[in-house]
Image (cartoon, helix red, strand yellow):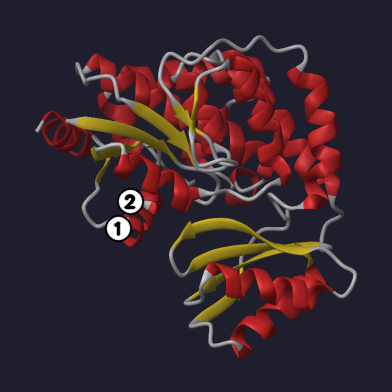
């Protein structure tokens, strides 16, 4: 049976995440300790006890989710899980996928996502950027609504998460206008998201320019597992292409629907959500009901995933 690993992005974090896993698996604490040494602060303490606003700070959220995903990936192999045929990560999760595919080492990834979070926070002044979820409209309708609402500002469809579920981002006022336009076009729901960073739109280009400088100092390897990348929805293993697409991802839409459809077309029947929460499992059901997605954030869940993937 062909399988894939899916790594979640921001929004999957919560205080106390991986608490049950940490009690059962020493590798959770070990992996967070490695990350804390790179960061210079106790990352596990923030994940365990908060405060919530600190965990939800983009510059902390990003290394926290990367570390959680890598820890679970390591535990999968401790429990003799099979290597997947593909890996893919949603937004930030693509860094976890690259670590899993041995294109990027964990220490470098921790440094990069910490910097990525800081650059994203600094790219747009607080209050001037926004994201919103649009439910119940076709992709092209949302794209057209953003064009209608722009009025010289930036607003764009940036996360194609599933059929009928698109996230938009840009200047706050333009996002608000686009919400109104989408409601007028029959959106079931159109609501602002509790984030201040307008990810994956052109407002992140300055952050990408700065991140490019850091990427020049990082060694990338060819991936040992094909990585289905956000900007193309297609697999890649060449290190230069992986690096280029990772950079483009910061200011380009996440083609998650295309990514999951590609996996299905390639015969993937089972996928593992390697990180906290079940966001990607929910999206997968909307994209392809025949694809089974197994979370692995607890010992019981990991055992069910092993059974499911091994058939």
Quarter of the image for residue 249 reads top right
Q: Is residue 50 visible?
A: yes
Residue at the spot x=54%, y=49% of the render? 255
Structural crowding at the residue carrying mark 1, measured as other residues with C-alpha within 10 Å and reported as few (<14), some (14–19) or many (≥20): some
Q: Check disc 1 and report the residue beneath it.
A: 285
| Image location of residue 254, percent across then percent down | 58, 48
| Image location of residue 261, percent across then percent down | 37, 48
Tag in front: 1 or 2: 1
Image side of residue 8 versus residue 269, left or right: right
Residue at the spot x=58%, y=26% of the render? 42
Residue at the spot x=51%, y=17% of the render? 33
| Image location of residue 88, percent across then percent down | 44, 35
Residue 281: give its label: 2
Residue at the spot x=12%, y=28% of the render? 310
Say above or below: 221 vs 263: above
Element class at badge 1: helix
């Amino acid at each position: 049976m062909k399988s894939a690993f899916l790594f979640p992005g921001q929004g999957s974090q919560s205080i106390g995440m991986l608490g049950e896993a940490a009690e059962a698996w020493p590798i959770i604490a070990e992996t967070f300790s490695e990350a804390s040494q790179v960061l210079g602060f106790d990352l596990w303490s923030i994940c365990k006890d908060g405060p919530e606003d600190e965990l939800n700070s983009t510059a902390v959220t990003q290394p926290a989710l990367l570390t959680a995903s890598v820890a679970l990936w390591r535990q999968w192999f401790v429990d003799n899980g099979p290597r997947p045929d593909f890996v893919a990560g949603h937004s930030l999760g693509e860094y976890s996928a690259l670590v899993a595919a041995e294109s990027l080492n964990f220490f470098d990834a921790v440094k990069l996502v910490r910097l990525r979070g800081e650059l994203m926070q600094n790219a747009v002044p607080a209050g001037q950027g926004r994201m919103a979820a649009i439910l119940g409209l076709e992709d092209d309708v949302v794209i057209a609504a953003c064009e209608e609402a722009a009025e010289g500002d930036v607003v764009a469809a940036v996360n194609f998460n599933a059929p009928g579920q698109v996230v938009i981002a840009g200047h706050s006022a333009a996002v608000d206008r686009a919400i109104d336009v989408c409601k007028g076009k029959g959106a079931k729901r159109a609501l602002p998201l509790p984030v201040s960073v307008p990810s994956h739109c052109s407002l992140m280009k300055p952050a990408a320019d700065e991140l490019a400088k850091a990427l020049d100092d990082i060694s990338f390897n060819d991936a040992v597992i094909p990585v289905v990348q956000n900007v193309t929805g297609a697999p890649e293993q060449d290190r230069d292409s992986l690096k280029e697409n990772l950079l483009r991802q910061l200011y380009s839409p996440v083609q998650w629907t295309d990514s999951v459809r590609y996996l299905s077309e390639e015969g993937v029947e089972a996928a593992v959500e390697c990180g906290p929460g079940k966001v990607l499992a929910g999206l997968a059901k909307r994209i392809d009901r025949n694809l089974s997605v197994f979370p692995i954030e607890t010992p019981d869940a990991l055992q069910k995933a092993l059974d499911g993937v091994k058939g």
